[in-house]
Amino acid sequence: MIVVFGVLVFVHELGHFLLARRAGILCREFALGMGPRIFSVKRGETEYTLRLLPIGGLVRMAGEDPEMDVLKPHMEVGLELGEHDRVKRILVNEPRSTSSRVVYGTLISFDLEKQLTILLEQEGESRTYHVDPQAMLVNNGQEAQIAPLNRQFRGKTVSQRFWAIFAGPAANFLLAFVLLTGAAMAYGIPSNEPIIGEVVAGGPAAQAGLRTGDRVLSINGSPVSTWEQVAVTINQSPGKQLNLVVSRNGEELKIPVTPVTEDNVGKIKMTQVIEYSFVESIKYGGMATYDFTMMILTGLGKLVTGGVGLNELSGPAGILQMTGHFATKGFEVLIRWTAVLSVNLGLFNLLPLPALDGGRLVFLGIEALRGRPVDPNKEGLVHFVGFAFLMLLIVVVTWNDIQRLFFQN
């Protein structure tokens, strides 16, 4: 469960991260998991973090940084000067330095977004200092790089912000395509030709005399041209004799077979031919990703129209149980299940709900139409309410999972 979810979340956040970096946005943190940090390492401008709870992740972009709100007028600050007397470190609540490159004074005003200046009062006189665009703010030993407006998320164009947000869900769809294509290359693609592949020893097909390589021409006098026709006819005929005409080595043979009943459908214990093709694997990856997407969208539609109730939804506990079940079926099945979860994660995040990527895209759309952004405070309130709703939904579906796991046979 941790490995599967870790891969899904990593790829989702990597999509956000790469497109944000491409747009020039300062990404302060790339985190896997939520809650307390258990490991972190800083490379360049970004801190890469592993957090305790494996239930999500985040890319923290500059522009919504509580650590940058410590500067207030009339407070005492120190400025460490670098080349050309530009400020390279702003010291707040730090021990007083004796270095000649550190100056102190009372903060009068500052602009760390556009003008990159700090105005200090020193011995009754005002002096303006120019700040390096990559200067560090140091508060109680904690360092944070400043972010001029052109390095902040909100300082980018609507198009750049759109792609930085959309890239997360898009990465999940891409992952699903890659997984399904890789599975097809490794394990083959079931052919829709009406040719028999493996015949299970002792099963009805083997007892009737069917062999690997036989091409089914007709069933009960009705011609067949696809494996789907063969499978549907057999599944719909439990306990009923079927007369198959097959072609074997240029000869047509009539072979009667009676499907046994399993899970209320007919089975004769044979499989279709498996094909291996690079081009067909790519086609399969694309079509399977599309099919899973439409299947999930149909389920979401039923949820909205009332065709599916909240009591039928599963949360993390239910997904954990299903992941464990599919893992016991083999690596191929687990890969396909991971692809389904990846599509589901991508679609869920694109829902136009506050606190999700889709909700943020809605606000970007509104900004594009009206020519100016929505008030950040109002947007933040909407996302907060949406986040609370999502937490409530998680509680509900988790309770569903608990009931199914412990109170139902």
Image (cartoon, helix red, strand yellow):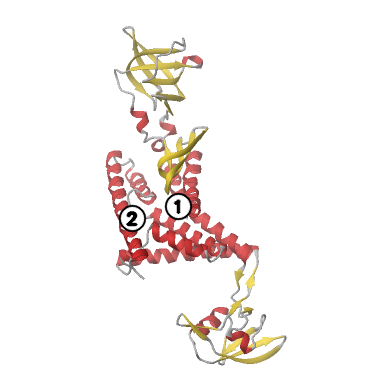
Closer to the camera in the image, 48 or 35 = 35
Task: Determine which quarter of the picture holds residue 80.
Answer: top left
Q: Which mark's residue is nearer the viewer, 1 or 2?
A: 2
Which residue is denoted by mark 1 in the rendering?
Answer: 169
Find residue 362 and report its horizontal and vertical position in percent. 35, 49
Q: Amino acid type of disc 1?
A: Pro
For badge 2, the amino acid type reads Ile
The numbered dot on residue 394 is: 2
* Cα–Cα gap, marks 1 and 2: 20 Å
Nearer the observer, 101 or 404: 404
Q: Residue at x 50, y 90 (%)?
A: 239
Would residue 208 appear left or right of 384 to someone viewing this image?
right
Residue at image x 40%, y 14%?
96
Residue 148: which quarter of the image?
top left
Percent position of residue 278, x then y: 65, 62
Quarter of the picture holding the C terminus: bottom left
Q: Secondary structure at mark 2?
A: helix
Report the residue at 43% width, 62% height from top.
321
Question: How many numbered dots are placed on residues in this image?
Answer: 2
Q: Tell which of 385 and 286 is nearer to you.
A: 385
Q: Which mark is residue 304?
A: none
Task: Name the N-terminal-most of marks 1 and 2.
Answer: 1
Horizontally, residue 340 falls left or right of residue 194, namely left
Q: Is residue 386 left or right of residue 48?
A: left
